[in-house]
Amino acid sequence: MEPRISYISPRLNEEALQHAIAYKLMFILGKDPSLANKHEWLNATLFAVRDRLVERWLRAHRARISQQARQVYYLSMEFLIGRTLSNALLSLGIYEDVKTALAGMGLDLEELIDEENDPGLGNGGLGRLAACFLDSLATLGLPGRGYGIRYDYGMFKQNIIDGRQMESPDYWLEYGNPWEFERHKTRYTVRFGGRIQHEGKNSRWLETEEIIAVAYDQIIPGYETDATNTLRLWSAQASSEINLGKFNQGDYFAAVEDKNHSENVSRVLYPDDSTYSGRELRLRQEYFLVSATVQDILFRHYQLYQTYDNLADKIAIHLNDTHPVLSIPELMRLLIDEHRFSWDDAFGVTCQVFSYTNHTLMSEALETWPVEMLGKILPRHLQIIFEINDYFLKTMQEHYPDDIALLSRTSIIDESNDRRVRMAWLAVVVSHKVNGVSELHSRLMVESLFADFARIFPRRFTNVTNGVTPRRWLAAANSCVLTERRGRPTKTGSSCACWRRKSPPSPVKTRRSTTTNWPPASARRAITGCRLRPLPHRKRCCRSCRRKWSGPVSWRVTRSLRV
């Protein structure tokens, strides 16, 4: 029986926003307004804005449960989401309202935005792409969820001391993170090491080291829509907090050694892997992400459907580069060992669930793991990888019996030097779709790096030209450029037709062509890279595109958001 509750929805007018910010400052943060500093006012504002997102977040969650739509799960080691206040205000359409409300309290919104810490969850294009995909999913109203790690520290801070660059830890959680919701009850056990015990056709993974993954949720709002999605981040906690016996003996460092060792997994984004211990920590970190995530996906699915028989029809897991590829053997392990699937059935489901984005063509940059290290840290997963490779090579031998070199080149296990597991090969063999990140990259990918696989799986490879959301990079970062001469611009993802010219077919969601007001030439050039002819008598969008201009104040463009 559902409890009957009543509440007053947070309002968006100036007076209500002022009351909400003051309330959060006094009753949530416990600060006297006359003594509060900028960061405390920032946190109060963040809490007030978050309240106005929560209702639509919960409503979207209920709608997805009732619709039982297929869910997209996006796994990435990085999510470079950036400062969130300005983006949330833009999505809610209350930027000017909050600015006016704060001005009435003697505060400047721009100063508070500058005060916000940049979440240390990513450091480059990989993370920014992941964040923009979540933004697009929410704006399009597609049910999706991102999964990553809640790092205590980002990469590092750069400071100039005595004329030299010095690095220091980037503790972005120094003042807390008002956007997140800690889910104390959502926790999963992640296991490492141990040994495999064979019982007939079944295997048991025993005597393992255990770490607890605790969930932290963050709202990802869609632009001017009730649709919202979730970014779930995992934080590592030790299975035992302290060795009381050693502590009472005065060995204080040894008493918390196991705790520190466990929690190092989510301590730093990309630990230095120039040493064996650094590489081992990187491997543990990647498995920590995928194990907690796949367990959570299966739990959420069973909670809704009470069966795993429809798993392939209801979930889609996308791997952003090779870091989360261990989710493939992890899903196999859980289906076989925990849920009693046959090997063939588990492999069939796994092949229907996963898709993979490749980000690099350099073979030396593709992730590989020594067989010895994988066998030590994840023995059951190494066993499953060997089984997948054996199944694949036997199939290839049936189709290409005379091409031994092809089998060697496509084997998931690289036997040329030290035996290593090629994670990109594993992703390509199992995923039902593999994409590059640009037209050129996708073409070179099938002509060079994955040429053998493109011959074997000609329909598996596709192109998805990646980009960034103009709401973040123009409307939020450079709003004056858009509004200087054009007024309020459209921010739902317009793009120049020449972006997609001559692109191979790819699975995209495309809205119909429409005429949309667009920013002036300088702003448009920054987005598209096109050399514009901005004068009204010019008749083309750009020198490389034959798309006709529809008039002096509008561009004929096609809205396209790839998902």
Image (tube, rainbow, N blue to C red):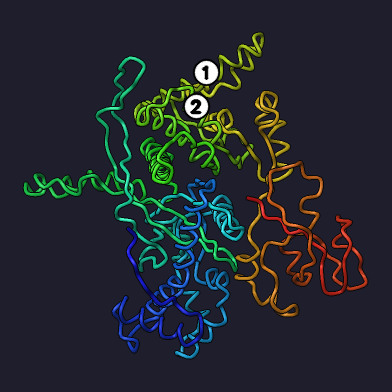
Q: Nearer the viewer, residue 551 or 40?
A: 551
Residue 282 shows up from this direction: no
| Residue located at (62% from left, 58% from top) | 140
Residue 257 — which label?
A: none
Q: Which residue is mark 2?
A: 347
Q: Report the number of numbered marks.
A: 2
Q: Is residue 254 left or right of residue 41?
A: left
Residue 391: mark in rendering: 1
Residue in view at x 69 percent, y 77 percent:
488
**Residue 22 placement (x, y as % from top left):** 38, 84
Query: For residue 554, what is the image quadrant?
Result: bottom right
Q: Residue at x 30, y 24 (%)?
A: 204
Tell which of 546 and 416 is nearer to you.
Answer: 546
**Residue type indicated by callout 2:** Phe
Q: Where 60 sits versus 423, above or below? A: below
User: What x and y, as percent, mark residue 560?
Assistant: 71, 56
**SS of the residue at dot 2?**
helix
Above or below: residue 463 compared with residue 145: above
For this orientation, the residue located farthest to the left is 249
Front: mark 1 or 2 = 2
